[in-house]
Amino acid sequence: AGPSRTMEENGRKLDANRGGGMIRMLAQVWFGLSFVITLVFVRVVCEAIHLIPGLDKRTKEMLSMQVMAYSMKVFLLFQIQIGVYYDCDKIKLECESIDATLARGQGVAIMINHTSKLDGFLAAAILPAHITARCKSFMAGNLFNAVLAGRIFTLIGHLPVHFKSDDYSKFTVDKEKQMKVVEEMEHFLKKGKILMYCPEGRINKNPEKLSPFRHGSFKIVHELNLQIWLLAVWNSHKVWPYGAAMGGFPTDLKISLNPLTPEKNNEKESKIEENNGEDAIPGVSKEKPHVKLSQKSFVKMEGIIERLRSGDPNLRDALLGWRVVAGFQIFAALTYLRYGGHALSMAVTFYPPAVLTLRELFSKQLRNRHVSNSSEIDTEEKKNTYGVDFWLSYWLIFTFIVVVESIVSMRDLVRSLMSTAHPDIQMFANVKSYSTNFGLDSWI
């Protein structure tokens, strides 16, 4: 009776969330249509990649993963009802740290909190494609049977977890089947690759509270000494609620990428360190370091999610600028189809540099704030973050040039429109006569 009552309550909450009216319904339809089209495209391209002769299996999987990553980036870009907030500069620095770790031949584990079906796809959209291409993930075996997406998971190289039961609440693994899968993953990670997975093991029905991490998943992380990064996502459950057939509801996603550092980050983690895990959880001892690692990761992830929930001042809508530019490019294309090349020249050349100039101004401000608040960045890294001045100068000069070009284009456009206008309008709006009267022949 307990689980059924919980499901009924979740259903009522879901119905309440859906009561936002026509906008929410249209957002869900747009999301669902875009998602299916994206998956079909990924499936077709990945199948084609795996038919290319002369490529080894791993190369095909990496190429397929890159197709998946770029497709998800485009998909998320056009979900204008979903804001995507994160500290761009911090994620860039962390991704550079991940690259440096992989360059040393050391493996990496990226762990994601799991509150909706969107989480894995969202990670592919947020992280750089060259990092995503070096990832493999453990996934429940039954997900590989999913319509459309199941085959994609195989093509991009993810590996199944063979549970003994299909019961959602049980995590007992078929050790005989799983042994071969673990050996394949170990061989992959020893080459300096990335394990990306959700340590909670399943979608969290209560996203307000982080579910316990599955200690067993940390054995391979500890044994191979993988460096851990935690990718925390807040509000994913509002975009695609648990129990909903399709997501897409308007909300703002908040995302943060942080390393699991050896420092004691708070009182809970300090207690785990001091007691070597013995007092934190009953049964934890020195003989089980992977459990201690699991507990530290849980505490760290809990703190990150709490910061996202309470509000991080460094977060900003990372896709807003790109969406504005993409929207204006579409507008420019339509302008070209209607009014011709002069209008296209004016629109395409003037608007994007102006937007990028503003983006660089805000980026510089955020970089400076991040550097001043960070004691972990060395002098050379601080020096490098001010390189934004070069790009700012570049875009200011470029903007000045295209403003001049746009004025010329506007003159030609006005003349073109006037030449097709009614004679009475031409008499009162002749650009040449106005310029002559005001002595502007040389400028016009």
Image: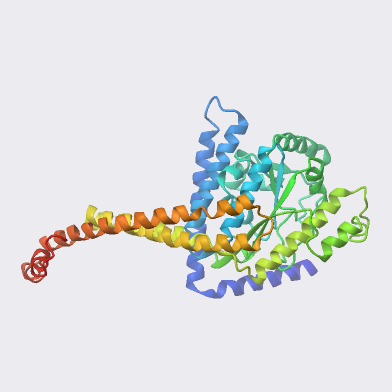
**Of residues 238 and 381, the one drawn nearer to the viewer in this rendering:** 381
Q: Is residue 29 above or below residue 217?
A: below
Q: Quadrant of residue 55?
A: top right
Query: Which part of the image, by quadrant, shows the N terminus?
Result: bottom right
Could you tell me how many numbered marks the image carries?
A: 0
**Of residues 154 and 396, the one drawn nearer to the viewer in this rendering:** 396
Q: Position of residue 12 (x, y in %)?
A: 65, 73
Q: Is residue 107 visible?
A: yes
Q: Position of residue 378 (x, y in %)?
A: 66, 52
Q: Position of residue 39 (x, y in %)?
A: 53, 48
Residue sitting at 62 percent across and 47 percent down?
A: 96
Q: Quadrant of residue 243?
A: bottom right
Query: Which part of the image, by quadrant, shows the C terminus?
Result: bottom left
Q: Is residue 244 visible?
A: no
Taking the image as shown, residue 250 lies to the left or right of residue 357, namely right
Q: Position of residue 212 (x, y in %)?
A: 79, 59
Residue sitting at 83 percent across and 64 percent down?
A: 268
Taking the image as shown, residue 442 lies to the left or right of residue 16, namely left
Q: Quadrant of residue 403?
A: bottom left
